[in-house]
Amino acid sequence: MEARLLGGAELYPSAAQTHMTNMAETASSGHRALEHAELSDVGLRRGNNQDSFAVVPASDDADWRRRGHFFLVADGMGAHAAGELASKIASENVGHTYRKLLDRPPIEALRQALAAANATIHNRGQANAEFQGMGTTCSALVLLPRAALVAHVGDSRVYRLRGTKLEQLTFDHSLVWEMTAAGQMPSGDVANFIPKNIITRSLGPHAEVQVDLEGPFPIEAGDVYLLCSDGLSGQVRDEEIGAILSVLGPQEAVRALVDMANLRGGPDNITALVARVPSVPPEEPEAAPNPVNQPAPSPPLHPLVWIVIGAGLLAALGLFLAGQNVPAFVAVLVAGAAAVFALVQGLGSPPPAFPLDNTPRGRGPHTKLSCQPNAEAVASFCQMAQQLREAAKDEHWTLDWARFNAYGESAQAALAARDYAAAIRQYALAISFMMSEIRHQSARKDQRDSSVLDI
């Protein structure tokens, strides 16, 4: 696969086009027991980034039990800035709407949130000729204390790594996947001519959209989830994704995955969002009330409040009939103030909680792959690192070779000890380090010719 280094060594876009956030908490339980990192990159062939993502972590334990942590990746489509706008609308609205729909169970709130975003994007497209027909993929993940929920439209993916098994939880709404599922996929070389980037469903182009729901998937300690756009999944093989997720933490993993997609050509925007669950809360005793399963009772109003409201209204009526309008007005105000107090008390009560609906949705996981680290996987990562080394030497780049070589030596030592996971980790870090060095070459050397890597 050809990967072109634009502008000599300017492999990556400016900081304004690349965005990473990270949160790593070490608490063993509760809403803080989560690690995640996100990275979105413009790639090597696009002038703007039409990908968007959103992370809305729970604010406290009650929120975590009621609505969980929310994650989203969206990949926009449309001319001019239409695709960028569509994905931005999805990333800014879906999570917000989901958390507002507290009178709905989580899975239904998730579906309605995507449907509402579809309506917003569609209406925006209809109102402006430049944005007409714009759309976006949208893959959303909710991590509740003991279950994961997925809502999905398009071909952006949600993966789960459990141990050494990588599973794709979403079904690609693409022409290739739809034809394969319908048994209409031709065999042999003919299949290679069917475009892999044609999607059959997205948010925005139509007034109504069918949202796929998947789950609930039981959560186990150590589970790792990846949400990504097809700029990543189209360039990095599933076995490589699984290897990276199994040996690197979230922040190192998103960096390595984006680096590998760019090494394979970076023909599209690339977004990776990785979330890891370090621990799962213990099962609660059956007799104990579970905040997820039972709504907290609203605190009762003091009887004096109702007495004040009733007395105030009766006094107002009597005073009004007696022709004492001012005192009657005062009595109405007192009764009104008591009524407002009662209303505020009611609004301030905790929103209803819903039992987790264990009815299976969807047919996921849709693919399963064993990603056990082995010598073959090590050899693949070693080859990428060596090719980067040769390209750097050919281009006479000024690098910290001692550090790069140290990664390689550590990898070789791990390989000799048959610690394949450690070897893959060291080679992945070597690749990311080399890519980081390459990104800074334009600042060290004003080289304007283009170079080509065959990775």
Image (cartoon, rainbow, N blue to C red):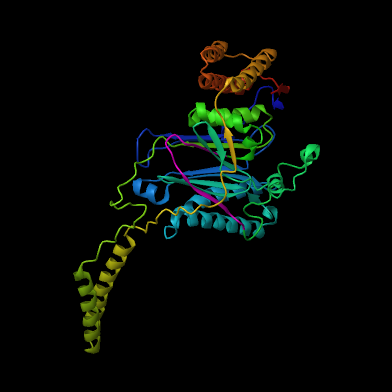
- The reply to whether residue 255 is visible in this rendering is no
From the viewer's perspective, is residue 444 above or below residue 131? above
Q: Quadrant of the C terminus?
A: top right
- The magenta span reads 209-227
Q: Position of residue 67 (x, y in %)?
A: 42, 50
Q: Is residue 163 left or right of residue 380?
A: left
Residue at 42% across / 53% down in the picture? 356
Residue 134 sits above or below residue 391 on the image = below
**Which of the two residues, 286 or 281, is positioned nearer the viewer here?**
286
Q: Nearer the viewer, residue 286 or 65?
A: 286
Residue 426 visible in the picture: yes
Residue drawn at x 67%, y 20% is: 446
Coordinates of residue 138 in the picture (x, y in percent)? 58, 48
The residue nearer to you, when weighing 257 against 374, is 374
Q: Is residue 71 magenta?
A: no
- Residue 230 image-quadrant placement: top right
